[in-house]
Amino acid sequence: MRWNYTGISQYLIGEWHIGKEELGILGSAFFYAYAIGQSPWGTLTDILGGRRVISIGILITAIMFLSLLLRVATMPLSSFEY
């Protein structure tokens, strides 16, 4: 797994007010998402090549961040009442 949160676990517990059980569930969720994503991305890399797959991943990430940015920017407008 490429995510190691042992150094920040105390800060996560203090900042998010969660227990060690919830922190373990969070770590498991990241691990399972990472494990599930390995097969499709690995297969795509074998078929299309590394550069194309990385470009696709960067494009998908940019689209997701852009949609989040647009949603956050319009949230104050949606709560405005006349």
Image (cartoon, rainbow, N blue to C red):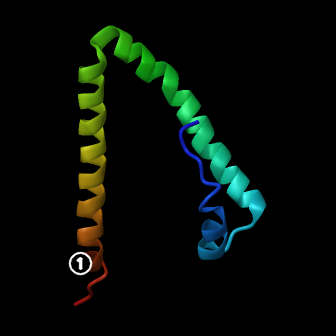
Return the x and y of residue 31 as percentages of the image width and height.
61, 39
Return the x and y of residue 52 as percentages of the image width and height.
24, 22
Which residue appears at 28% of the width and 76% of the height? 78
Q: Nearer the viewer, residue 73 or 47?
A: 47
Q: Does 1 sit above or below residue 46?
A: below
Q: Does 47 sit above or below residue 29?
A: above
Query: Residue 40 is drawn in which quadrant?
Result: top left
Within 10 Å of disc 1 (Cα), the crowding (few <14, some 14-19, many 20+) is: few
Query: Residue 14 is drawn in which quadrant?
Result: bottom right
Q: Does 33 sit above or below residue 79?
A: above
Looking at the figure, which quarter contains the N terminus?
top right
Residue named by callout 1 = 77
Which residue appears at 24% of the width and 70% of the height? 74
Looking at the figure, which quarter contains the C terminus?
bottom left
Return the x and y of residue 18 as percentages of the image width and height.
69, 69
Which residue appears at 31% of the width and 33% of the height? 57
Q: Nearer the viewer, residue 2 or 44?
A: 2
Which residue appears at 23% of the width and 54% of the height? 66
Q: Is residue 33 left or right of residue 23?
A: left
In the image, farthest residue toward the front:
7
Q: Nearer the viewer, residue 68 or 11?
A: 11
Q: Is residue 66 left or right of residue 14?
A: left
SS at circle 1: helix
Amino acid marked by disc 1:
Leu
Q: Does 54 sit above or below residue 42?
A: below
